[in-house]
Amino acid sequence: MNAAVVAPLLLSLQVAASATLLALVAGIACARALGRRQGWLRDIAESLLTLPLVLPPTVLGYYLLVLLGKQGAIGTWLHERLGIELIFTWQAAVIAAAVAAFPLILRAASAAFADVDVQLEQAARSLGESETRVFLRVSLPLAWRGVLAGALLAFARAMGEFGATLMVAGSLPGRTQTLSIAIYNAVMAGNDDDARTMVMVSLIASVGILVIAARVLGRRQVR
Amino acid sequence: MRIDVDIGKALRAGERRFDLAVKFTSEADVTVLFGPSGAGKTQTLLAIAGLSRPDRGVIRIDERTLFDETRRIDVAARRRRIGFVFQDYALFPHLSVLHNVAFARAGAWPWPRLSRIAHAPADVREIIDAFALGAFLKNHPQQLSGGQRQRVALARALAARPGLLLLDEPFAALDAPLRARLRDELLAVRARFGVPMVVITHDPEDVGALGGRMIRFDEGVVVGDGRADAPAEPTTEAP
């Protein structure tokens, strides 16, 4: 494989892995905050948090630009206080992919935590454990399988991110040009060989992730 | 030890709504909460443990107030030092018997590296011996029989060194011969570890065998109490 294929692939893996980690932490935290609450407020909060899943990626990219750009609320603060410019960096691609992948982890984690028997958490409390320790020692170990399956889907989604990434990170070869963007560019430029290879790589990676996710979820629950 | 309970809570179980209004005092080593299912016994036990919050009232153990609605006192479950044995035991399915029993004694690091019984504190080893769990330490709860699970649940609660042990229908899931044996075991545990107990049952046989003080429940209220070995006459008067 030539550099035109390898560089975007490695960048995509780097971006997707970072984005998944980011989305994993945020997704678990939000799933835990939503917890076993019920009612209107919870439904509204969950809907808003799931929005990135259904919004067109370009809309997502637009709002990320509005927030992170030089005139944006967060972008201005980052630039003036820390001298950081996010737009057109690979870190911006990470944020775009993380936002797009976040609802997948949130959904999976919420379902997995809801499946944990309340009585087991009660038992841990009566044994003297704080809420944090109940979470670390009981809830998370019992829910990790579902969370992990969500993380794998999130990784696949992050690998395939296109629209939002293009808007906030652009398509700088070797710096922000991820696999899915490189495929688009290759097709537009008529580099059919490169395009074919990258499409195959992308396909194999996606199938592999889905197979692993199925294995993780399908393995018989130890209960 | 003296247990004072005087609590109220509006409960909803499916279509049915009823008001829990429970008041009793006991200084017995073994207090038996007796009555039909759905009478509010479990809710009372959960409230004593701090796992369910009453709407009003007071819960006191000796001089220590655990809950007082008017004074806004509600001690967290983890600080009450009250052991709870759930009806279906609620053993941690992802942990071995050893890690279940020693759960409360893990120390500061949330993931204990307690790989061998030799690393367990001396009193935990004593509890494991007392319940004859030595042979199953590496097993997981789902590999145990009903009687073994109950022993693990009891051992786990005792290893936290509780000042009071609450047991919700401890024999309900067991067949009759095993039930009689574990009743004797429970009394032996009481004698050995000297921890007072509050036990829920709807089986009159349990009441006679466990002795102590009996609090009779019906429809969310205490309808009578007396010595457990001489069950009180059924009564319909409300407190």
Image: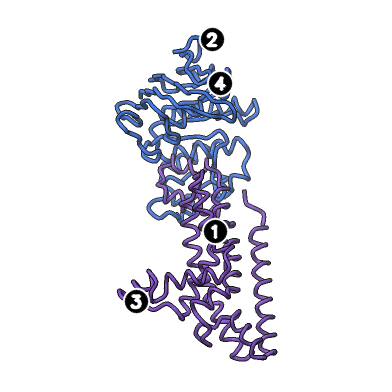
Chain colours: A purple, B blue
Q: Is residue B81 above or below residue B206?
A: below
Of pointers 2 and 4, the one earlier in the residue sequence: 4
Q: Which amino acid does label 3 sit on?
A: His
Res. A50 mark? 1
Q: In which quarter of the image is residue A83?
A: bottom left
**Whether marks 1 and 3 lie on the same chain:** yes
Give the Cα distance between marks 4 and 3.
Answer: 73 Å
Percent across and percent down for residue B42 are 51, 28
The residue beneath circle 4 is: B206
The residue beneath circle 3 is: A79
The residue beneath circle 2 is: B234
Helix, strand or loop at disc 3? helix
Q: Nearer the viewer, residue B62 or A213?
A: A213
Q: What residue type is labelled 2?
A: Pro
Q: What residue type is labelled 4?
A: Asp
**Whether marks 4 and 1 lie on the same chain:** no
Q: Which residue is drawn at 54% across and 60% down?
A: A51
Local crowd at mark 1 within 10 Å, few (<14), some, or many (≥20)? many
Give the Cα distance between marks 2 and 1.
Answer: 57 Å
